[in-house]
């Protein structure tokens, strides 16, 4: 109690201090000066050229009111402006914008009140008690929207602050009314650029984690256009409601960005300071599905005689009305002093709190904190006002009895003859086609009263039910049984009327029977379980036939559904005037011949379902007839009393199974009167179940334990099978990885996700390419080139398997191999590369091109040893790459070599000489290597005691002649294979420029062949 008294005393003290401000002004300032603080740069709506004329007009209006009241005083104004163009962040982005810098230059404060600033950053520095300036006069601001300026005794805000906007949205979203349910989840979109001052702070209030909006609503922030586009087009959206602050142009750009989004999406656009919604009678097509929040109609819109009407807006009107407010409060104070009363001036923490007056922007009501309360208008699509939200009372006032509002859903109450039921909280979501377990079942789903529900379309054209249909729906509403799905009512969307039913999430019985992987015969679908399923359907039908809905009429395996507890329930019953029965494989023969429904017809349909359950085959399965239309015809028109029915195999069946099969045959008897009713079916199934497998004395616990053991064994087998498949797939993936990357690299990637680059002190690198490859390609088709390279390099790869080497890569006809990395092997790297090179050269001597028989295959080989760095490069298709001068030198060794020769550097020869292997080599002499100068190089010719069948390399003269004759040799080979030059001319080779030329004309005379030219000379020095 003491604390409460202290709080009340403090409030009265603050009020007295606030009112003393005006009393001091009355005593010391007979001219009643206002300091008007604003921007000068013409970019903001409250810049000086727009505001000064409006304030002068307000002073004239106030003087007129004073004359009417018999008071002789006039307001005056000092204008202080500030230009922020010199700052890095102009306008309100500058933390010292507007009046702050001006006030710091003032030695003495003048005036009774300050009009402005409008920027939150500036106002906060003026009015905050801890860090603000020593300001003794009150501030009236047309702006200062931020939460940081809330509840400041010296601050009055003429325009609605962010606190009012966010609070009104919380109440609006929570409220249920005739055009919307309660909305729990929303998106809030923040533009990343060109954000106005009001939108910046309104978005800030919706985003702040500790503010009222974030603590009361589930909201997800979208920062930027890309986040917004993803949310609009995602199938798994957080919400269908998108809140944003901006204008009509922002909506147009958003819909252009998203192109297509869900039809249930609705935008809530905060556009408070745009009076155009009351001026325009029609809206853009882009404003469909947009709910606009704006201020009520303004008075200045109709004041066409104002001299400054072309530049008027809500901010300018705020400065104008701030001056009127100051004059109104002064006038009331003077009149109260004249009458010697205090009752005319309301008590408040601020001198302008709890004041009402009329201004250019409409009627003003200021709360106890000096902030404006307003009636926000909610306007939809055609700029029609749906409702008005009063922030002073936090209530919604409906403005339209029948609003044209259909998004995200217009919900229709179901009114029956006896029962009235409303469904306002059905939230629906679309299900993708590939996720539907049954196309007739999983069309729409959602939740009603925290229960999963399914929405089924009632194919009814106008949505208005007849009296008979209302009675049927009311009867359906009263049905409540364990083996029947519950009906909750109907709901109307713009695209149809839907019935709301209990959702059984495992899908239809037909889907369960088809899924032999999830529901194998050995466990879930053994004979006991099948009888249990048949028993559930019989119980549901037995109850239905004794209820006020005496017949189903559409019974089939697709409308028997299974819930999470594996209980089978029947759906789609009742509503015969809305859902017409159709003729299908489950329809009894008497109803195929004559339209209608009956209880005995339901028994026949039950027999077809029981056959599906027992055999787990397609509906009405027969071995020799698969056409549904033919089956229905043969059922409808039997031949010679031979009634057509599904096949039942009695051979090998036990006595209990035969008893079950006989029950099914009795149920599809041609004579309806001989079919049993569902009560008798129940009793028969119960007897069969109790005697199955001679388990008459088995307790329920024994049965449960036995079934659990069977299920456990099946699970163990399934786990073993899946584990074996997983291991096989893992091994297959590992083999593929080891083919692409070295083993240590693969293991490092699997264990740590990265490979450290490594320096190797000494490795040997091999390069080779095909001599005359370009000429071969000129006369070969693309597929022939691919096949040729594949045949060559597959044989090369098989040779590599016998040596400790690593194939780095192939590029076109170039083949690169390294040894000594990633596994170091001493001096063996040079030995293995040398042996491998001899093996490859030996193979080339015996290889024949399949598409060019008789044409020799020549390769050049270069080998070099030295240091090298290696590492994995890239995330996409990572490659194990080699770097260093050794790689370049090995490539030069290959390019300066000769056909069918192994060109080896001196560094490699020295390593080979250190080993025990006796390699044979010849000194070639000094060879010029680009970037290296002259180097002594060698030809590797074999191994002492080795048996290498190496091809004889061509002599220099012979090689030059073979180069000149290579094209003619290829053409001659093609002639023999193709059968004439006409056929060769039609070949689609890689070079479309090369055409048939007469063999007698030299190919070099017209166009030299584009093979790899080699400089061959008697001089042992070779230049590249």
Image: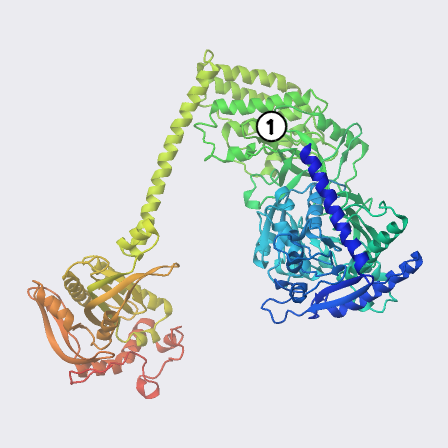
Q: How many marks?
A: 1
Residue at horizontal 51 percent and vertical 16 percent from the top: 688
Q: Quadrant of residue 849?
A: bottom left
Residue 1010 lies, with reference to residue 714, above or below; the image says below
Viewer-proximal residue, 902 or 806?
Answer: 806
Q: Residue furthest top?
A: 697
Q: Quadrant of the N terminus?
A: top right
Q: Quadrant of residue 943?
A: bottom left
> Can you identify the residue that label 1 sits on?
569
Viewer-proximal residue, 361 or 672?
Answer: 361
**Any part of residue 376 in sight:** no
User: Measured from the top left, where is residue 825 in percent x and y?
Assistant: 17, 58
Residue 659 lies, with reference to residue 981, above or below; the image says above
Apparent side of residue 968 relative to residue 548 in the rendered image (left or right): left
User: Measured from the top left, where is residue 897 in percent x and y?
Assistant: 20, 76
Apparent side of residue 577 relative to residue 858 in the rendered image (left or right): right
Viewer-proximal residue, 941 or 676?
Answer: 941
Q: Quadrant of residue 912?
A: bottom left
Apparent side of residue 1024 relative to residue 476 in the rendered image (left or right): left
How is this picture coloured? rainbow
Residue at horizontal 26 percent and vertical 66 percent from the top: 816
Q: Quadrant of the C terminus?
A: bottom left
Please, what secondary structure does the residue beneath circle 1 have? Answer: strand
CA neighbours of label 1 inside 10 A, class few (<14), some (14 to 19), many (20+): many
Q: Residue furthest front?
A: 27
**Any part of residue 655 in sight:** yes
User: Measured from the top left, where is residue 563 in percent x and y?
Assistant: 56, 30
User: Measured from the top left, where is residue 164 in percent x and y?
Assistant: 71, 49
């Amino acid at each position: 109690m003491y604390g409460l008294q202290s709080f009340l005393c403090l409030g009265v003290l603050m009020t007295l201090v606030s009112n003393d401000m005006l009393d001091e002004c009355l005593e010391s300032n007979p001219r009643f000066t206002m300091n008007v603080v604003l921007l000068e740069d013409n970019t903001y709506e409250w810049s000086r050229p727009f505001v000064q004329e409006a304030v002068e007009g307000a002073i004239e209006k106030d003087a007129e009111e004073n004359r009417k009241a018999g008071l002789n005083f006039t307001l005056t104004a000092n204008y202080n402006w500030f230009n922020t163009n010199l700052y890095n962040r102009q306008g309100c982005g500058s933390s010292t914008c507007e009046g702050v810098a001006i006030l710091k230059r003032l030695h003495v404060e003048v005036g009774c009140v300050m009009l402005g600033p409008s920027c939150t950053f500036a106002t906060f520095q003026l009015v905050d008690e801890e860090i603000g300036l020593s300001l003794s006069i009150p501030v009236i601001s047309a702006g200062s929207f931020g939460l940081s300026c809330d509840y400041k005794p010296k601050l009055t805000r003429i325009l609605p602050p962010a606190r009012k906007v966010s609070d009104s949205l919380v109440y609006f979203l929570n409220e249920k009314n005739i055009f919307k349910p309660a909305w729990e989840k929303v998106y809030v979109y923040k533009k990343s650029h060109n954000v106005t001052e009001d939108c910046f702070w309104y978005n800030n209030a919706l985003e702040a984690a500790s503010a009222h909006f974030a603590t009361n609503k589930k909201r997800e922030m979208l920062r930027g256009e890309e986040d917004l586009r993803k949310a609009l087009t995602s199938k798994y959206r957080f919400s269908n409601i998108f809140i944003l602050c901006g204008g009509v142009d922002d909506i147009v750009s958003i819909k252009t960005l998203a192109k297509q989004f869900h039809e249930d999406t609705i935008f809530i656009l905060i556009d408070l300071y745009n009076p155009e919604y009351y001026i325009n009678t029609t809206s853009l097509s882009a404003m469909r599905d947009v709910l606009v929040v704006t201020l009520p109609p303004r008075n200045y819109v109709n004041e066409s005689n104002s001299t400054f009407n072309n530049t008027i807006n809500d901010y300018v009107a705020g400065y104008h009305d701030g001056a009127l407010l100051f004059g109104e409060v002064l006038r009331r104070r003077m009149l109260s002093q004249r009458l010697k009363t205090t009752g005319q001036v309301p008590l408040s923490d601020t001198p302008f709190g709890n004041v009402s007056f009329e201004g250019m922007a409409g009627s003003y009501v200021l709360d106890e904190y000096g902030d404006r309360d307003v009636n926000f208008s909610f306007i939809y699509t055609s700029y029609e006002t749906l409702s008005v939200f009063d922030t002073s009372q936090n209530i919604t006032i409906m403005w339209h009895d029948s609003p044209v509002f259909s998004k995200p859903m217009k919900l229709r109450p179901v009114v029956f003859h006896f029962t009235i039921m409303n469904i306002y909280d059905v939230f629906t979501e679309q299900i993708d086609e590939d996720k539907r377990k049954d196309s007739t079942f999983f069309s729409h789903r959602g939740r009603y009263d925290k229960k999963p529900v399914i929405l089924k379309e009632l194919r009814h054209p106008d949505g208005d039910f007849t009296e008979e249909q209302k009675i049927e729906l009311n009867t359906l509403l009263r049905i409540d049984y364990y083996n029947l799905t519950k009906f909750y009512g109907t709901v109307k969307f713009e695209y149809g009327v839907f019935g709301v039913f209990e959702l059984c999430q495992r899908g239809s019985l037909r889907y369960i029977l088809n899924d032999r992987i999830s529901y194998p015969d050995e466990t879930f679908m053994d004979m006991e379980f099948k009888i249990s399923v048949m028993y559930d359907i019989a119980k549901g039908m037995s109850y239905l036939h004794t209820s006020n809905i005496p017949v189903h009429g559409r019974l089939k395996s697709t409308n028997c559904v299974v819930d999470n507890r594996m209980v089978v329930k029947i759906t789609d019953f009742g509503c015969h005037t809305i859902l017409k029965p159709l003729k299908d494989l489950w329809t009894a023969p008497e109803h195929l011949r004559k339209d209608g429904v009956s209880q005995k017809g339901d028994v026949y349909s039950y027999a077809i379902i029981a056959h599906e359950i027992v055999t787990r085959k397609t509906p009405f399965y027969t071995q020799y007839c698969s056409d549904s239309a033919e089956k229905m015809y043969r059922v409808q028109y039997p031949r010679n009393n031979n009634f057509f029915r599904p096949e039942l195999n009695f051979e090998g069946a036990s006595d209990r199974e035969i008893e079950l099969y006989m029950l099914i045959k009795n149920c599809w008897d041609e004579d309806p009167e001989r079919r049993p009713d569902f009560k008798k079916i129940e009793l028969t199934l119960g007897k069969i179940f109790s005697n199955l497998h001679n388990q008459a004395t088995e307790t329920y616990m024994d049965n449960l334990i036995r079934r659990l053991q069977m299920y456990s064994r099946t699970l163990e087998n399934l786990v073993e099978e899946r584990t074996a498949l997983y291991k096989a797939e893992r091994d297959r993936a590992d083999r593929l990885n080891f083919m692409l990357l070295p083993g240590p690299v693969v293991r490092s990637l699997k264990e740590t996700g990265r490979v450290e680059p490594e320096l190797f002190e000494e490795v040997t690198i091999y390069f080779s390419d095909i001599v005359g490859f370009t000429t071969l390609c000129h006369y070969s088709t693309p597929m022939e080139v691919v096949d040729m390279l594949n045949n060559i390099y597959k044989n090369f790869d098989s040779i590599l398997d016998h040596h400790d080497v690593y194939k780095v890569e192939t590029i076109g006809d170039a083949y690169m191999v390294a040894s000594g990395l990633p596994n170091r092997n001493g001096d063996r790297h040079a030995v293995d590369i040398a042996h491998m090179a001899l093996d490859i050269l030996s193979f080339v001597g015996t290889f024949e091109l399949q598409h060019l028989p008789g044409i020799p295959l020549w390769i050049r080989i270069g080998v070099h040893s030295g240091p090298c760095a290696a590492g994995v490069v890239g995330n996409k298709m990572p490659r194990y790459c080699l770097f260093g001068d050794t790689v370049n030198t090995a490539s030069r060794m290959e390019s300066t070599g000769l056909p069918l020769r192994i060109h080896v550097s001196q560094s490699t020869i020295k390593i080979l000489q250190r080993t025990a292997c006796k390699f044979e080599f010849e000194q070639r002499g000094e060879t010029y290597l680009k970037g290296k100068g002259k180097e002594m190089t060698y030809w590797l010719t074999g191994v002492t005691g080795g048996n290498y069948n190496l091809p004889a390399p061509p002599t220099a003269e012979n090689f030059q002649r073979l180069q000149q004759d290579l094209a003619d040799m290829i053409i001659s080979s093609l002639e023999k294979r193709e059968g004439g030059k006409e056929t060769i001319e039609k070949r689609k080779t890689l070079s479309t420029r090369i055409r048939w030329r007469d063999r007698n004309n030299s190919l070099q005379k017209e166009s030299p062949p584009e093979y790899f030219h080699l400089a061959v000379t008697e001089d042992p020095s070779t230049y590249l």
